[in-house]
């Protein structure tokens, strides 16, 4: 049977070419998944490759379709079981599977969502108690980081609740410098949920970041360390930098269940969420961190109310006693000024009252 000249071969090489326009991080995840499946095939099926497996499945579908279904889902279940034996946790297996499913679909092997649900079983998810980043650990990390701008980056993560990917895409024009605390307007297109939101940065972060802002144009990335413009790569580089710092501090412990680091860039976001929840409740914390599904009361607050709540929280977020003391002095001075004004108003009212009685 002749094949139309319009039909082009779909190979691993053409697939890699197809995904070449995707973010670097996504490309890398797809390649890691294909390599993982290749290792599985080579271990369980001697002298076989992904190519021979795909060709065998295509032949079965044409010649023995009743056996094709069982062969395909048996193969996928064996792959899942193999990954479980390799110590790959359930959530990672599911991520791998979504990428493998996409690759197999491109190569002509289709899977049905309902069939997947009924025929495949992933390893049980292991919930480990997460290590909470302590204020002491946070301070140690910031002290060891040498680059002042990178210090500001990690201070921002813990004082705003932002994701590392969001912070790496912030531009100067996203900052409102006119308020009592710098307001961070996070555009929808750079958020995970594709919903814009606003948060604030602490006075600690501002003091570290301010010296750089005057040199920036409005469209300049705030945390541009000159490596690459790709968001995923820039975020990954900062994760690697953090791991280097943690190793120097002997804070690089890992969870035995999945070998993940106990402290990651996400730990700073969790630090903010925990303290914001303690101070103002989960609704407020969810809103500032950009979690989906939160209640809407926070959105109905005025900008002044939002800022006042953040300033109340800020004292909890601080990692340096000096800055805490400076803020406390500032608060006392403000209270004293308001008290002085109140006393003056009372004196004026009394004076006006006395004049009315004359």
Image: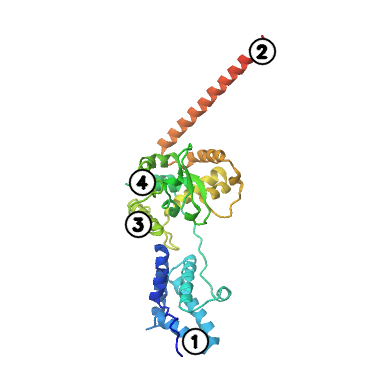
From this viewpoint, is residue 132 visible?
no
Q: Residue at x 49, y 65 (%)?
A: 91
Kindly report which numbered mark, 4 or 3, lies closer to the viewer in this rendering: 3
Sequence-earlier tag: 4 or 2? 4
| Front tag of 1 and 3 | 3
Toward which corner of the image does residue 321 lie, by quadrant? top left
CB under 8 Å between callouts 3 and 2?
A: no
| In the depicted structure, whether residue 339 falls above or below residue 186 | above
Callout 4: 10 Å neighbours few (<14), some, many (20+)?
Answer: many
Which residue in the structure is indicated by mark 1? 60
Residue wearing tag 4: 149
Measure how far apart labels 4 and 2 are at the Cα level. Answer: 62 Å
Label 1: few (<14), some or many (≥20) within 10 Å?
some
Numbered disc 3: secondary structure: loop
Q: Position of residue 316 (x, y in %)?
A: 48, 41
Residue marked by disc 2: 356
Residue found at x 51% / y 85%: 61
Quarter occupied by the C terminus: top right
Instruction: Judge left or right: residue 85 versus residue 358.
Output: left
Distance from Cα at disc 4 to Cα at disc 1: 59 Å
Q: CA distance from mark 4 to mark 3?
A: 17 Å
**What label sits on residue 152 in the rendered view?**
none
Q: Position of residue 315 (x, y in %)?
A: 48, 39
Horizontal side, residue 141 vs residue 342: left or right: left
Question: Are dots 4 and 2 in contact, CB under 8 Å?
Answer: no
Position in image of residue 251 (x %, y %): 38, 52
Q: Which residue is mark 3?
A: 228
Pick the front one: 161 or 80: 161
Q: Nearer the viewer, mark 1 or mark 2?
A: 2
Q: CA distance from mark 3 to mark 2?
A: 74 Å
């Amino acid at each position: 049977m002749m094949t139309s000249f319009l039909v082009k071969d779909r190979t691993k090489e053409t697939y890699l070419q197809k995904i070449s326009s995707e973010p670097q991080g996504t490309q890398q995840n797809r390649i890691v998944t294909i390599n993982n499946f290749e290792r599985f095939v080579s271990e369980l099926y001697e002298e076989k490759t992904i190519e021979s497996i795909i060709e065998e499945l295509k032949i079965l579908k044409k010649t023995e379709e009743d056996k094709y279904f069982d062969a395909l889902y048996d193969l996928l279940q064996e792959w899942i079981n193999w990954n479980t034996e390799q110590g790959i946790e359930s959530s990672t297996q599911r991520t791998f599977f979504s990428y493998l499913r996409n690759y197999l679909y491109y190569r002509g092997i289709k899977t049905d969502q309902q069939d997947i649900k009924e025929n495949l079983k992933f390893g049980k998810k292991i919930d480990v108690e997460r290590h909470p980043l302590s204020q002491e650990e946070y301070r140690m990390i910031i002290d060891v980081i040498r680059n002042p701008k990178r210090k500001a980056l990690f201070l921002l993560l813990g004082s705003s609740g932002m994701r590392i990917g969001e912070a790496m895409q912030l531009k100067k024009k996203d900052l409102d410098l006119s308020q009592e605390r710098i307001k961070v307007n996070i555009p929808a297109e750079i958020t995970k949920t594709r919903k814009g939101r606003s948060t604030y940065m602490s006075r600690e972060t501002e003091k570290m970041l301010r010296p750089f802002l005057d040199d920036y144009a409005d469209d300049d990335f705030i945390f541009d360390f000159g490596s690459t413009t790709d968001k995923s790569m820039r975020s990954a580089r900062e994760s690697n930098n953090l791991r280097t710092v943690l190793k120097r501090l002997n804070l690089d412990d890992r969870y035995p269940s999945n070998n993940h680091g106990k402290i990651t860039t996400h730990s700073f976001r969790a630090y903010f969420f925990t303290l914001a929840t303690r101070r103002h409740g989960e609704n407020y914390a969810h809103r500032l961190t950009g979690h989906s599904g939160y209640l809407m009361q926070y959105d109905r607050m005025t900008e002044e109310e939002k800022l006042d709540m953040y300033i109340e929280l800020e004292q909890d977020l601080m990692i340096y006693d000096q800055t805490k003391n400076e803020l406390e002095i500032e608060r006392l001075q403000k209270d004293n000024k308001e008290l002085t004004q109140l006393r003056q108003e009372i004196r004026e009212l009394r004076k006006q009252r006395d004049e009315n009685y004359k």
